[in-house]
Image (spheres, rainbow, N blue to C red):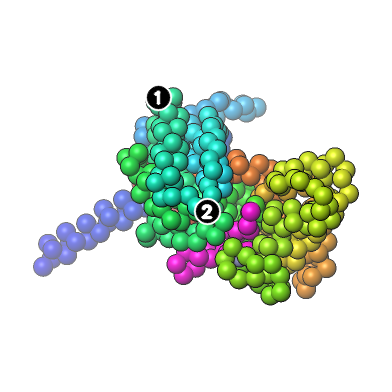
Amino acid sequence: MHATDQASRSRRSVATSQTARALNRDILLRTIHRSQPVSRADLARLTGLQPSTVSAITEQLIDEGWVTPGAMGRLPRGRRPTFMMLNDQHVTLAIDMRPGKANLALVDINGKILARKTIDYELSAGLSVEEAKIVIAQIAQTARSLKAAFADRVFHGLGVSVSGRVNRKTHRLIFSPNVQWSRIDLYGELQKFFEDPIEMENAATACLFSERWFGDFRDASNILVVSISEGIGAGLLIDGRVARGHDDMAGEFGHMTLDESGPKCGCGNSGCWEVFASNRAGLRYYHELAPESTITTFQELLDRAKAGDLRALRSIDKMISYLARGLSMLVAGLSPEVIIVVGDCTALWPRIRPLIESQLIAKSFTPHTPSVVAAMDGDVARLRGAAAMVLRKVLFGKADFVPHVAREHMPRKTEAAPA
Ligand SMILES: [Zn+2]
């Protein structure tokens, strides 16, 4: 019995030390990702780990190829520190499926876009399944040629951002009222062309990953991303976790009813938020003010607004006023620290930001209103987000948790694994 006890104790202690080492490796990798370029001394200071532990695990990460020693730092005296970086040899493919076009990119582990392509397609309501499959095949072939052009890099998989919600168990698009992709098995079709892992996610949630992985909001725990295009979608980070909801449907605020007597929505209801505040709403307001106008795209409306067309400006102001009205409800219910606006309308950000902020302040019942920022390039945000979905899984193996080193999770120095 005694021997068995000893063996089990020894097994437990091996497991504990392996677990601690794996945990410390994760913490160091996250800290390098968040603070790079960063010296070993700063890594010890930021993580609370022993310098010897930091050195040993950093060496391991360099040997594994995840981390690369970069430039030498400068100090008044003593040894010059080497700054650690994530190794940009690691790359992933990103595809952003939008109504009418797909953007493709090869993105490295630090968010740099190495190459980009766009494929335009017709996606009418009457599109047959076979026609849709031909479009997917064309996109996949282009993606493969991008990958082949960087064959010297370490490739990790394919991230796909789509308008609509994705059921993470079946990988099927379950709600996509403005696009026809839900009729085919998009994930299954792409799998025919790639042996590598595929991650598929809603576009607004992808933008959330982009901000958390590559952007300025790596430390924020409560973020609301609102993506405005043909519809309105949202990605939610609540208390450090991506909110998914039952059936992965959380975030469809675009279909909150603002006015039941309003226009019909693609979801089947009437008067949803998105029929008042999406790009299509902006265009509709313009045609009401300028019935003689023949413009058909939101980009044309933006161009007119930029040129000083008063009716175009009034249409966009009306759309943004409705946008702000919905946002004030979300702020009351979710209390985000920051709202990130993604969409073509951000081209007029100096005009629309005060419109949103003034309404949020007017409706607020607390002294703090969230900061409102624009994702400067929505296309880039979606592509980098699609890449981040793959990379976080490769690096940390967790399906859903956005890496975050919380102080309470940092091991005390006495708990650090032996070097
Ligand atoms: Zn709706």
Residue count near mark 1 (Cα–Cα under 10 Å), binned few <14, some 14–19, many ≥20? few
State the image coordinates of residue 277 (x, y, percent, origin top left): 71, 60
User: Residue 62, image x and y in percent?
Assistant: 41, 32
Figure label count: 2
Label 2: which secondary element: loop
Q: Which residues are magenta?
A: 230-254
Residue 43: image location, x then y, percent: 52, 42
Task: Pick the residue in front: 276 or 287.
Answer: 287
**Which circle marks residue 176 in the picture?**
none
Specify the amino acid type for callout 1.
Asp
- Which percent across, then down, holds residue 57? 40, 40
| The quarter of the displayed image where residue 371 is located | bottom right
Q: Is mark 1 within 8 Å of ligand 1?
A: no
The disc placed on residue 152 is: 1
Q: Nearer the viewer, residue 418 or 40?
A: 40
Amino acid type for the residue under numbered disc 2 = Ala
User: Badge 2: how crowded within 10 Å, few (<14), some, or many (20+)?
Assistant: few
Side of 130 where 331 appears, left or right:
right
Secondary structure state at the residue bearing disc 1: loop
- Which residue is located at x 49 percent, y 40 percent? 94
The quadrant of the picture occupied by the C terminus is top left
Image height of 156 relative to 209, above or below: above
Q: Residue at x 40, y 24 (%)?
A: 152
Q: Which residue is mark 2?
A: 125
Quick check: can you spot residue 41?
no
Picture quarter containing residue 395? top left
Q: Quadrant of residue 73?
A: top right
- Residue at 63% over, 50% down: 217
* Mark 1 or mark 2: whose residue is earlier in sequence: 2
Q: Cα distance, mark 1 to mark 2?
A: 41 Å
